Image (tube, helix red, strand yellow):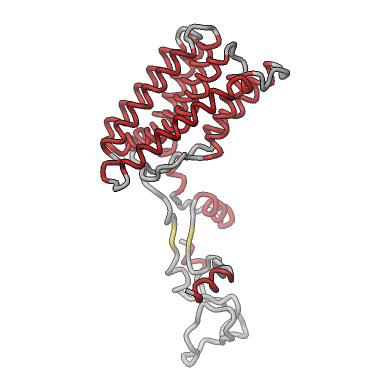
Amino acid sequence: MYASAATRPFQSSEYQYSTNNPPWQKLLWVKQNYPDNYVDNTFLDELQRNVNVRSYDYWTMVYESGVITQHISSVVIFIAIFIYLQIHSISGNHLIWAGSLLTGIGYIIWDLTLLKTRSNHEFKRQRVAKSAFFFFVTLLGLSPILKTLTSQTSDDTIWALTVCCFLANVLFHDYKTQANSIKIPGSLSTNAAIFASVLLASRLDTNFDVFGLLSFAVEWFSLFPIFRRYLKDLSPKIQIGVTIAMLLTCVALFVHISKAVAFIYVLGFCFLTFICPYWLIFIQKYKKYVYTPVHYLIDTYIFLINSEIHGPWDEARPRLQRPRRNIYRKRSN
C-alpha cells in the first residue's frame, strides 16, 4: 500500500541512473550519489505494524477483573461497617473481636502454607506477635486523641475528604503486586485509606468504637490485600469464591441501609466484570488498520490514528551514565 507510493524512486533532471552507482543506504549523514529524498524498494522492508497489540480472551479478563471488584467491595464493606457503628447497630467490642479472629485465621493459613519453608520461621512468629501487640497498645492509647482530632471540622468537610481519600485509595492501589513480595502494597493508597478511616472514626461516640474501627481499618486495608493476592495465586476457584463472597457481603450489609445504593453497587459490579472486558475487546479492532483508498491525505490520517508502526527510524533512547559513586565503589571492590 504505502510501499508502492513511498518507495517510488525520485525522478529529477539532475539524477541519472547508472549501474556504477553504489547501493543506496538508509543513512542521511553519508554523502551518496542520490537525491536527498530518494528511496528504493527496500525502504519499508523493516516496517512493523501493531507490534504491541494483544489478543484478549473474554473470560480471562472477566476473571482478572475480580482484583478490581474485590478492592472496591472492600471499601464498600468498610463504609457499611462505619455506618453500623455510627447508628449503634454493632459495637466496637464486636468489631475488635471479629477483626482479630479473621486476622488470626488468615495468618494461620498463611503460616501453614507459605512460611513453612523459611528457616527463620519461629523468629518471624515472635516478631509478628510482638509487633501486633505494640501496635494495638499504641492505637488504644491514641484513640482519645483521634476521636477529638476533627471536632472543630464540619461534617460536610469530613464526608468530602473521606470520599476523596477513598477515590485515591482505589485509583492508586497496587493491583499488580505479586503475593511473593510480603510488603504493604501501595503506600499512597494505604495511607489514603487509613486517613479516611481516621476521619470517619472522629465522628464516632466512644473511644472504644474509634479503636475498633481503626484497628479494623489497618487489618482491612493493609493486611487483607496481601491475603487476597495470596488466595488468588492458590487457585482460580478461590479467587472467584472470594469475589462472589465479597459481593454478597456488600449487598447484605447495604440492603438494610439503602436498597438504592445496593442496587447501584450491583450494577457497577456487573459493568466492571462483564461489560468492560467486552468493551476493551471491541475497541481493540481499531488498532488494526484497514485500507480504504479515498485520498492519500485522508488515508494517511486514518493510518496514523488507528495503527501503531515501528521501524529503524524510531527515536534512539539515550543510555544514561551511572552515578560516579557507584563506579568508584565497583572499582574499589
Asked if residue 205 is positioned above or below residue 149 in the image, the reply reads above
Front in this rendered view, residue 272 or 143: 143
Residue 101, x across and y down, in percent: 36, 21
Q: Residue furthest bottom?
A: 20
Front in this rendered view, residue 169 or 207: 207
Q: Give the left or right position of residue 191, taking residue 127 as reference.
A: right
Would residue 41 be visible to someone looking at this image? yes
Q: Residue at x 53, y 20 (%)?
A: 211
The answer to which image quadrant residue 49 occupies is bottom left
Asked if residue 19 is positioned above or below residue 265 in the image, the reply reads below
Front in this rendered view, residue 258 or 180: 180
Q: Give the left or right position of residue 58, taking residue 74 as reference.
A: left
Report the number of numbered marks.
Answer: 0
Q: Residue at x 43, y 53 (%)?
A: 52
Residue 304, x across and y down, in percent: 54, 54
Q: Residue at x 27, y 31 (%)?
A: 237
Residue 87, x across and y down, in percent: 54, 7
Asked if residue 333 is positioned above or below residue 106 in the image, the reply reads below
